[in-house]
Image (cartoon, helix red, strand yellow):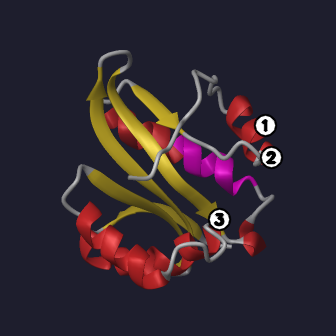
């Protein structure tokens, strides 16, 4: 396998919609995802991808901001690796690449949310040095 990591240009965000659709198990329509990613282009958002011979096989969003409790912070979002590419150490390599990339940009911390029932991700993030700070709540308006 010939894996590489890079920041996807905003003009190519449409190419990650199928992966994020799979991540959400089809709960968010592809047209809605396309529309939202089009808006996200202008909201301190970057998209990091894993490619294998030019095919995108993994993705995560990077939200950049400054928080009162953690300083210059990056929130990783919608982390997904296609099933055929899992359990090969790729997630660990991706997190190392993201850490290095964000540190070079001058950021001080990385944050994330993970679904309560996603126990394998909890173990993975613990092993990557993440600590649980609290709960994430959502209210639709």
Question: Which structural element holds mark 3?
Answer: strand
Position of residue 106 measured from the top left corner of the image (x, y, whole percent): 28, 30
- Mark sitting earlier along the chain (3/2): 3
Relative placement, left or right, of 46 versus 81 is: left
Q: Main secondary structure of the magenta part?
A: helix
Any part of residue 105 in sight: no
Q: Which mark is residue 21?
A: none
Task: Quickly name the residue at label 2.
Answer: 120
Task: Quickly name the residue at label 1.
Answer: 123
Proximity of marks 2 and 1: CB atoms separated by less than 8 Å: yes
Any part of residue 131 in sight: yes
Task: Quickly name the residue at label 3.
Answer: 81
State whether residue 90 is above or below residue 107: below
Range of magenta residues = 89-96
Position of residue 108 measured from the top left corner of the image (x, y, whole percent): 37, 24
Name the residue located 32 percent from the left edge and 56 percent from the top edge.
46
Q: Residues within 10 Å of mark 3 (few under 14, many from 20)?
A: many
Name the residue located 43 percent from the left edge and 40 percent from the top edge.
75
């Amino acid at each position: 396998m010939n894996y590489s990591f890079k920041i996807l240009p905003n003009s190519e965000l449409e190419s990650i919609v199928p992966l994020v659709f799979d991540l959400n198990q089809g709960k968010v329509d592809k047209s809605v995802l396309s529309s939202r990613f089009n808006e996200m282009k202008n909201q301190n958002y970057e998209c990091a991808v894993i490619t294998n011979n030019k095919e995108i096989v993994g993705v995560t969003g990077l939200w950049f901001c400054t928080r009162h409790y953690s300083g210059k912070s990056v929130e990783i979002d919608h982390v997904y690796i296609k099933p055929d590419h899992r359990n090969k150490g790729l997630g660990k390599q991706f997190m190392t690449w993201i850490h290095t990339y964000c540190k070079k940009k001058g950021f001080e911390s990385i944050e994330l949310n993970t679904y309560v029932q996603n126990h394998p991700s909890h173990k993975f993030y613990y092993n990557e040095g993440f600590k649980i700070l609290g709960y994430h709540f959502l209210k639709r308006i």
